[in-house]
């Protein structure tokens, strides 16, 4: 299992990479994704679960808008996870997640995920190391269960620098079309950056059987490209074809 | 309440209308819809429920692909209704529907709907006229309940001719990329065309408080245009604006 240490990993595109050329490539990939999604829905054999994690301002919502808007909404669902409701909190932490896993033919996006239950909960000391350890094991078993039922899981961490985050949070307070995203807790959480990184690192070490993709995300054009390309490669690898007439 | 009689209503675009110009207009409307959906999600005040009904082959799936693919999947959900599961059938007919109504900020599409419970059920005599009458009343009350909670309901019937339907069903049996849509019951149901029209007419008469939009659908380019334009007018009429910073 490869060791993930976020502080050593790039948050930006490789130097010299052309923004314009990369955006053109992304645009072509999105056309291919649209075709492949149609085929996936028709074939009705594979399910795809896409998990998107990242700090506030890392561009999770933007990624969904930029990469998945080219897809037919009939074949894709997005679930944005918030703090558990009382009913959800009265169950184990995977109960509400399990309910939103994809059926065959479908793409399911989780905007945040069950990984919050081993990260924000550690940062704020709502759970201890022993509980975290049990949860890591539970997550691995859960993800195996899904994989064995032909659900492919892609896990993306949108990796930004703390400096970039602070710029984006400031923008939320000043740009009229972004103010609705501002939350008064954003800056308090941002101050806990190093603690978050510590627990992200730990979660990635413990739950990397199905590997995490660490996406350099300071530049949206590069983030979009890498995520779109990763999904494209995954769908091509399904080697799908249109089924014939049902018997 | 205006009388709807499907046999007297157009299934094609007005003569002389330019297909190319109409497609260009639709393309511009889709760009506007994408912007307005983003605003609707941010404003978080309005909910929109879009009901799509139509005979097999009337282009419900195609409409969703062509008109809604330009939208951010985070703000839209599609629910395709099939025959009720045993659990669903053990409740009243609106129970499963109610669960899939949109929250504020969201667009919810119902591909088929609770109207199946007063149409296919009549055609096959699974319910009698008395039960149908009770259901019409229940539907009207249900739709009022949603409207009063700031959910706007758009009801579209995709109106095709029987000849056009038969051509499309034939295509499903021969075109490799369409075979997956073929169902062996399609032709049996198609033979009941006149009975379906009778019960559609009745349902439209009885449940037109929130009006039905009868969409001429023999030509997909015209169907897409009219539906997109109707949604655009609805969203413009919401007179939305970006909210300021939360207090």
Image (spheres, coloured by chain):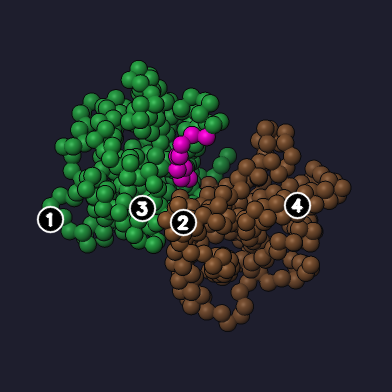
Chain colours: A green, B brown
Query: Which circle's residue, 3 or 1, is located before the other in the chain?
Result: 1
In the rendered image, the vertical position of residue B100 relative to residue A18, given as above or below = above
Per the image, label 4 sits on a secondary structure element best described as helix
Cβ–Cβ under 8 Å for marks 3 and 4? no
Badge 3 and badge 2 in a common chain: no
**Vertical relation: B68 (above or below) A102:** below
> Picture coordinates of residue B128 (x, y %)?
85, 46
Task: Work out how far the residue at label 3 is from the one at label 2, CA to CA, in angstroms.
Answer: 13 Å
The residue under label 2 is: B42
Residues tagged 2 and 1 counted as in contact (Cβ below 8 A): no
Classify the position of the C terminus of chain A by image quarter: top right
- Provide the residue designation for mark 1: A16
Q: Chain of mark 2?
A: B
Q: Is residue B161 visible?
A: no
Q: Position of residue A88 (x, y in %)?
A: 52, 31
Q: Specify start and end residues of the magenta stretch as a single range.
A: A77-85
Location of residue A7 in the rendering, given as x and y in whole percent from the top left corner: 18, 37
In this rendering, do the residues under marks 3 and 1 share a single chain?
yes
Q: Left of A226 or right of it: where is B122?
A: right
Mark whose residue sits in front, 4 or 2: 2
Label annotation for residue A62: 3
What SS does tag 3 mark? helix
Same-chain check, marks 1 and 4:
no
Name the outermost residue toward the top: A130
Same chain? Circles 2 and 1: no
Q: Nearer the viewer, mark 2 or mark 1?
A: 2
């Amino acid at each position: 299992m490869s060791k993930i240490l976020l502080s050593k990993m790039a948050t930006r595109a490789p130097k010299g990479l052309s923004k314009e050329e990369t955006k053109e490539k992304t645009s072509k990939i999105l056309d291919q994704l649209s075709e492949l999604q149609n085929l996936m829905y028709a074939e009705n054999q594979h399910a795809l679960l896409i998990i998107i994690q990242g700090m506030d301002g890392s561009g999770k919502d933007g990624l969904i808008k930029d990469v998945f808007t080219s897809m037919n909404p009939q074949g894709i669902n997005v679930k944005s996870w918030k703090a558990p409701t009382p009913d959800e909190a009265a169950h184990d932490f995977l109960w509400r997640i399990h309910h939103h896993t994809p059926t065959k033919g479908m793409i399911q996006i989780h905007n945040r995920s069950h990984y919050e239950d081993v990260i924000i909960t550690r940062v704020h000391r709502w759970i201890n190391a022993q509980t975290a350890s049990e949860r890591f094991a539970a997550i691995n078993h859960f993800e195996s269960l899904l994989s064995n039922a032909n659900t492919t899981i892609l896990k993306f961490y949108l990796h930004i620098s703390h400096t970039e985050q602070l710029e984006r949070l400031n923008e939320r307070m000043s740009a009229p079309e972004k103010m609705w995203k501002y939350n008064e807790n954003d800056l308090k959480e941002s101050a806990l950056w190093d603690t978050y990184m510590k627990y992200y690192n730990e979660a990635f070490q413990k739950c990397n059987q199905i590997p995490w993709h660490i996406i350099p995300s300071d530049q949206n054009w590069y983030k979009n490209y890498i995520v779109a390309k990763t999904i494209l490669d995954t769908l091509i690898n399904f080697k799908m074809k249109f089924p014939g007439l049902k018997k």
